Image: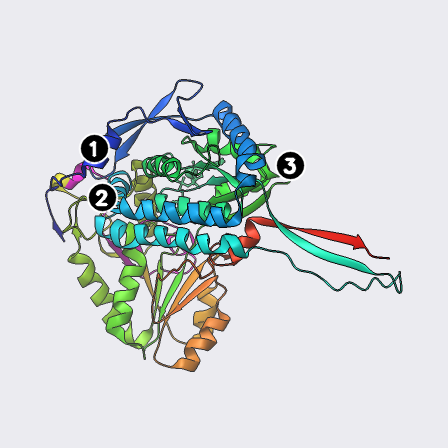
Amino acid sequence: MTTTAPATTQLHSDVTEFLSKQPHKLLIGGQWKEAVSGKTFDTYNPATSEAIAKVAEADKKDVDEAVKAARKAFEGPWSKVTPSERGRLLYKLADLIEAHADELAQLETLNNGKTIRESRKGDLPLAVDLFRYYSGWTTKIHGETIPVSVPYAPGAKFFHYTVREPVGVIAAIIPWNFPFLMAIERLAPALACGNTVVLKPAEQTPLSSLRLGELILEAGIPEGVVNVVPGFGPTAGAALAAHPDVDKVTFTGSTEVGREIIKASAGNLKRVSLELGGKSPNIIFADADIEAAVKGAFMGIFYNQGQCCSAGSRIFVEKSKYDEVVEALVAKAKTVRQGPGLDSTTHMGPLVSQEQLDRVTGYVASGKKEGAKLLCGGERGDGALSKGYFLKPTVFVDVKDEMKIAQEEIFGPVATVMPFESTEELVARANGTVYGLVAGIWTKDIKKAFRTANALRAGTIWINCYNFVDSAAPWGGYKQSGYGREKGPYALELYTQLKSVWVDLN
Ligand code: NAI
Ligand code: MG
């Protein structure tokens, strides 16, 4: 394990200027407003645990105002914008995000902790592409004509058509692991379909959503179409989920809160789509390209400090290659350079918050207590890193399937590596959690790869690769990893509803 002293990286002048606008306000109806309560909360740099900005704290009253503004925009100016013009606005926003990508990447890294390389090469280009992708869809969302027969009215003639319409006011409640990207993943299809949005970023990472709010206004998207209300889950989040004038909630986060959202949605039967946790298997067969598989398994669990819904946290290795893979993973983990995300030489940044660090170290303790063997990591960063929320990359062996660390989502840099002997045994164990988000398969045997892919109950399967995503490919979970599919044309189903129209021709 090597560590570096935090390098003082030069912040982009636009980042410094944005940070100086404190306290940051809520975006409601195109205006920047203080919270009705006047309250603010601090947001932190997880690499140092220092507060970096004060942000207005939205609560129920602010949420009410934001929903009102979103409704007004939905029924007013936004409904008058043609599909073609909507596409042009989304494309313009993509261009603006691209022009500000360096700045936005720094802001994201500063607030979330992830490495600048990940922000710059992953989150930002994906965000730009999502807006470009959905800007092309605005003019292609349409109904159909249906040749109806009507058995109880023989000979009767009708003209029947469907209209695909926006759902209305969407509440987007998003987490802190990919703050900017999660916001865009909701906004791009929601706006493309003609909805308006109230966006509640996670309390840990509100800054990139607020900067995005500025760019949305700069792009010329009418006021009230997007409203940004940072605040806490049990207050602002719960108010949105229960709000009688919100037509749909799209939520990404814990399975536990996902259940709360469903309950809260019952009042007005609002639509809900959920992207929840995972405990994903990354499966290495003995005939795999072991070097590639180790690289993929390593990145699969340690990318973004393991704070990914898609984290390949259960690494299954066929017995004959088990020792070799374990040894290679541990050797790699020991060379990881931890440091502030803004330092370009850093491989791995801090966890997002003290709360998350406590949660993850709790799982490390539980693994040890239940008898798993810790081969490396499990402890906080030392020296200059002790001020931040750093946890060394952690590898457990001697893990039993029923242990907590093999069943529950840890959401940190903690790998459990387990041997298997037969494919049947493997499939049962790989499917043996309440989750079903993704799975990885490493083998050179094409039939085995496809057979295993068929047998796994997961929304995404990667064969000889891991963690690839694209604007056009569906994303979502089986089982308790959620329901609904984001991205691609699939998200259009989530953000539209169908009207069936009959015209009498008799
Ligand atoms: P969380 O599920 O509590 O928070 C996610 C979002 O939901 C945040 O915006 C939060 O303010 C909001 N929220 C919280 N309680 C709410 C409520 N009662 N009503 C409406 N909105 C509410 O996640 P948290 O506490 O940050 O992390 C806990 C665990 O959740 C993690 O350790 C991880 O296992 C999982 N998680 C999964 C994510 C994923 O991408 N699937 C993302 C974040 C967390
Ligand atoms: Mg929570």
Q: Quadrant of ligand 2?
A: top left
Circle 3 residue: 268
Residue 421 image point, x, y percent: 38, 75
Q: Is residue 182 left or right of residue 306?
A: right
Viewer can see residue 169: no
Say which of marks 3 and 1 sits in front: 1
Q: Which mark is residue 390?
A: 2
Q: Are marks 3 and 2 in contact (CB under 8 Å)?
A: no
Label for residue 238? none
The kind of secondary structure element at disc 1 is helix
Amino acid carrying label 2: it is: Phe
- Give the foreground label among 3 and 2: 3
Q: Quadrant of residue 287?
A: bottom left
Between 370 and 504, the residue placed more toward the observer is: 504
- Above or below, comparing residue 444 to residue 385 in the picture: below
User: Where does the C terminus fall, quadrant-wise?
Assistant: bottom right
Give the SS element for disc 2: loop
Residue 76 in the image: above or below residue 137 = above
Q: Residue at x 50, y 72 (%)?
A: 454
Which mark, residue 16?
A: 1
